[in-house]
Amino acid sequence: MRKPFIGIDGIPGSGKTTFRDRLIAKLGEASCKVHHVGQHSWLSPWATEAISEARRGAIGIDKQHLVDALIEDKKLHLASNVWPYIEEAVVIADRFCISDLLLIAAVCPGAEPLYVERVVSLDLLPDVNIVLEVSRETALQRIVEGRKTGRFLDDPASLSAGVATIASTALENLGTRVERISSAGIPPLFREVERIVHSVLKHYH
């Protein structure tokens, strides 16, 4: 029986890294094998070029080409970095689907339904997408304090667009369970980690 597949998502500055690292550590303490993957596989040269161009905030990107690139990358990601491990380990994926929607909304607004239509046809998606929620003001403060700014998606204008997209109904149409968790404070966030670990243990063995 395959192990749980968990996606961790949220806007920049929402606490994804803090949540992920705590979850991986606690699962390890519970003797669960964990395999962590990032958002992209970067295994297709043409898809990598298209995604990288979008992440740089290029203007005039063809929406069909970007969606094709994101789906191609996801297919390779699943084949190379998820399926080979899912029978033996809990797979934790950073920004697996929802952050793709954020990127599309920022550079090709209106193309989100096209991506959703394609991504739901993939042969494996996270059993649950954990979406960390925080106010824009707190997220921006964390970005500035952490000096993580570097991509145009970390800028305030793009961040606001991302919040609107994540709150949209497209999120609910991904075909997987979505759990929204407040990341406004560390103690409550870590309590949520304990809850997730308890749930994973029910399906691990």
Image (tube, rainbow, N blue to C red):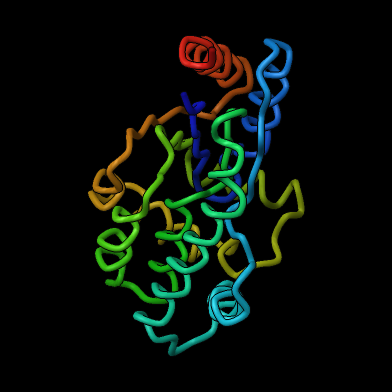
Residue 194, percent from left and from top: 57, 12
Number of marks in the image?
A: 0
Instruction: Indicate whether 82 appears above or below 164.
Output: above
Instruction: Indicate whether 6 appears above or below 60.
Output: above
Residue at image point 46% right, 15% down: 203
In the visual, does 117 lie left or right of 178? left
Quadrant location of the C terminus in the rendered image? top right
Instruction: Indicate whether 48 appears above or below 124.
Output: below
Q: Quadrant of residue 115?
A: bottom left
Residue at image point 57% right, 82% down: 46
Residue at image point 60% right, 54% down: 80
Residue 145, percent from left and from top: 74, 46
Residue 132, percent from left and from top: 49, 35
Residue at image point 49% right, 34% down: 5
Say which of 152 and 81 sits in front.
Answer: 81
Say which of 81 and 20 sits in front.
Answer: 81
